[in-house]
């Protein structure tokens, strides 16, 4: 059989081999073209699927960021409403004439409520925890006046040195101190912060400092809310101190006698 085929091929003219070669080459070229087109279509399909997945991921990220900004906006509105309410209470305390000791207690309670509200009004994400406190300057040091529930009154840090703490630096320079990492600050004193890694200090006129501690760096919105609350605290303490400095208490007691 093999010899028969070989004899048949040997008797074929040259043009048969030439034509056969052309047909084979044409077939190979056609096959490569079809395979290439199929590969291109498959690649385009993969690219479309990847592009669709990318669009879905971008859409998911956009929705997530939009939800975060919405929460921030709602929390900021809530904080501003609280600040407005505190200002109204301050105006009422100034407007109505009551017993001196009651007036003093009104201003002191207002400051305490503001400090307690602040630690929750700057909570923009689940799991965040803050503590806030007001410190008063006495004899060249900062003495604890009041603080939020998260502030541990038993930790012994009721007095802050003026020259060795971030709060003291804020009071001395009369500048806001925003420190995202207290361990990297020369006045950080990490042990006194009980695990809180960031701190914001806002001077209160000539008499004290508002401190806000957080476990991680503050969001930008936190500073604006804290500054508003600090101004309300400042006004309340101004009225509080005026009653003491002006001898209003003694006057009221004498009238009652």
Image (cartoon, rainbow, N blue to C red):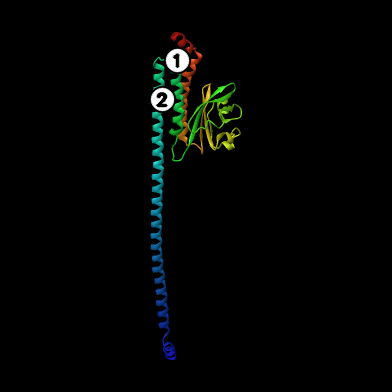
Residue 4 vertical placement versus 247 (above, below): below
Quarter residue 63 falls in: top left
- Residue 146 is tagged as none
| Mark positioned earlier in the residue sequence (1 or 2) | 2
Q: Residues within 10 Å of mark 2 (few under 14, many from 20)?
A: many
**What residue would you read off at disc 2?**
86
Q: Residue at x 58, y 37 (%)?
A: 183
Dividing the image into 4 quarters, which one contains the N terminus? Answer: bottom left
Which marked residue is nearer to the observer: mark 1 or mark 2?
Answer: 1
The quadrant holding residue 120 is: top left
Seen in the image, is 117 located left or right of residue 137?
left
Residue at x 40%, y 68% (from the top left corner): 35
For mark 1, give the secondary structure.
helix
Q: Is residue 118 above or below residue 91?
A: below
The spot of residue 192 in percent (x, y) is 57, 33
- Of 248 and 210, nearer the camera is 248
**Which residue is located at x 41 percent, y 77 percent?**
24
Cα separation between marks 1 and 2: 20 Å
Q: Which residue is mark 1?
A: 100
Label 2: state its secondary structure.
Answer: helix
**Position of residue 184 in the picture relative to residue 126 (left or right):** right
Q: Are dots 1 and 2 in contact, CB under 8 Å?
A: no
């Amino acid at each position: 059989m093999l010899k028969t085929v070989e004899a048949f091929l040997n008797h074929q003219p040259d043009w048969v081999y030439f034509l056969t070669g052309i047909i084979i080459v044409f077939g190979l070229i056609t096959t490569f073209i079809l395979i290439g087109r199929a590969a291109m279509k498959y690649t385009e399909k993969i690219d479309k699927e990847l592009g669709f997945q990318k669009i879905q991921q971008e859409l998911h990220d956009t929705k997530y960021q939009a939800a975060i900004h919405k929460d921030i906006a709602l929390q900021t509105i809530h904080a501003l409403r609280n600040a407005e309410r505190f200002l109204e209470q301050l105006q009422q305390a100034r407007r109505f004439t009551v017993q001196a000791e009651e007036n003093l207690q009104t201003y002191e309670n207002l400051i305490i409520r503001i400090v307690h509200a602040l630690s929750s009004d700057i909570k923009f994400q689940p799991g965040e925890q803050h503590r806030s406190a007001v410190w008063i300057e006495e004899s060249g040091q900062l003495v604890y006046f009041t603080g939020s529930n998260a502030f541990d009154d038993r930790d012994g840090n009721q007095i802050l040195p003026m020259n060795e703490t971030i709060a003291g630096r804020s009071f001395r320079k009369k500048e806001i101190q925003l420190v995202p990492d207290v361990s990297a600050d020369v006045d950080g004193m990490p042990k006194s912060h009980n695990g809180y890694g960031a701190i914001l200090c806002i001077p209160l006129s000539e008499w004290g400092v508002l401190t806000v501690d957080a476990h991680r760096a503050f969001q930008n919105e936190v500073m604006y809310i804290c500054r508003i609350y600090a101004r309300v605290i400042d006004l309340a303490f101004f009225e509080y101190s005026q009653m003491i400095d002006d001898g209003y208490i003694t006057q009221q007691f004498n009238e009652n006698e």
